[in-house]
């Protein structure tokens, strides 16, 4: 592996990092961490271990592709049942929805 960050060309340092997915810790893994942008890089073996840990924790492949639909004058985003289950979402749960940037919508459950 290169010792320069692919994203910003910052210096990479070997560290042990706490790996988190969707706010749940999967444990500690060896990584090369960029000193400039903080991006974490894992070698292939570690990536496979992380994938296994994600599968064990039921967190693997929770992202889904979809399309924006509409109803009346509103646009609708469907929440896949796997994500609803993971987050324990219920019908009519109060939410706050806001743009995080031009390409990302955040939804907080209150
Ligand atoms: Zn970087």
Image (cartoon, helix red, strand yellow):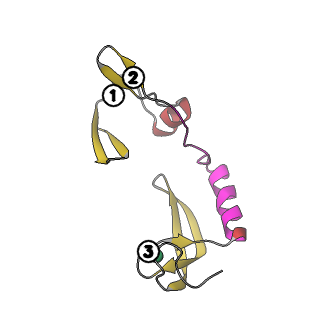
For marks 3 and 2 on the same chain, the one whose residue lies earlier in the sequence: 3
Foreground of the two, 5 or 56: 5
Residue 23 at what x, y percent from top left?
45, 54
Give residue 49's quadrant in the image: bottom right
Q: Cβ–Cβ below 8 Å for labels 3 and 2? A: no
Which residue sits at x=57%, y=71%? 28
Q: Residues within 10 Å of mark 3 (few under 14, many from 20)?
A: some
Label 1 residue SS: loop
Cα–Cα span, label 3 and label 1: 35 Å
Count the marks: how many?
Answer: 3
Numbered tag placed on residue 91 in the rendering: 2
Cα–Cα span, label 3 and label 2: 38 Å
For marks 3 and 1 on the same chain, the one whose residue lies earlier in the sequence: 3
Residue 40 at what x, y percent from top left?
52, 72
Q: Residues within 10 Å of mark 2 (few under 14, many from 20)?
A: few
Which residues are drawn in magenta? 45-66
Label 3 residue SS: loop
Cβ of mark 2 under 8 Å from ligand 1: the answer is no
In magenta stretch: residue 46: yes
Q: Cβ–Cβ below 8 Å for labels 2 and 1? A: yes
Q: Which residue is denoted by mark 3 in the rendering?
A: 38
Cβ of mark 3 under 8 Å from ligand 1: the answer is yes
Of the 4 image quadrants, the one containing the C terminus is: top left
Which residue sits at x=48%, y=81%? 9
Numbered tag placed on residue 93 in the rendering: 1
Give residue 53's quadrant in the image: bottom right
Numbered tag placed on residue 50 in the rendering: none
């Amino acid at each position: 592996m290169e010792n320069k960050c692919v994203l910003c060309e910052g210096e990479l340092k070997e560290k042990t990092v706490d790996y988190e997915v969707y706010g749940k810790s999967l444990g500690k893994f060896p990584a090369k961490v960029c000193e400039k942008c903080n991006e974490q890089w894992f070698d292939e073996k570690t990536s496979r271990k992380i994938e296994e840990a994600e599968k064990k924790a039921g967190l693997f492949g929770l992202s889904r592709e979809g399309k924006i639909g509409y109803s009346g004058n509103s646009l609708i985003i469907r929440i896949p049942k796997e994500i609803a289950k993971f987050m324990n979402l219920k019908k009519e749960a109060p939410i706050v929805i806001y743009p995080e940037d031009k390409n990302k919508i955040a939804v907080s459950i209150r």
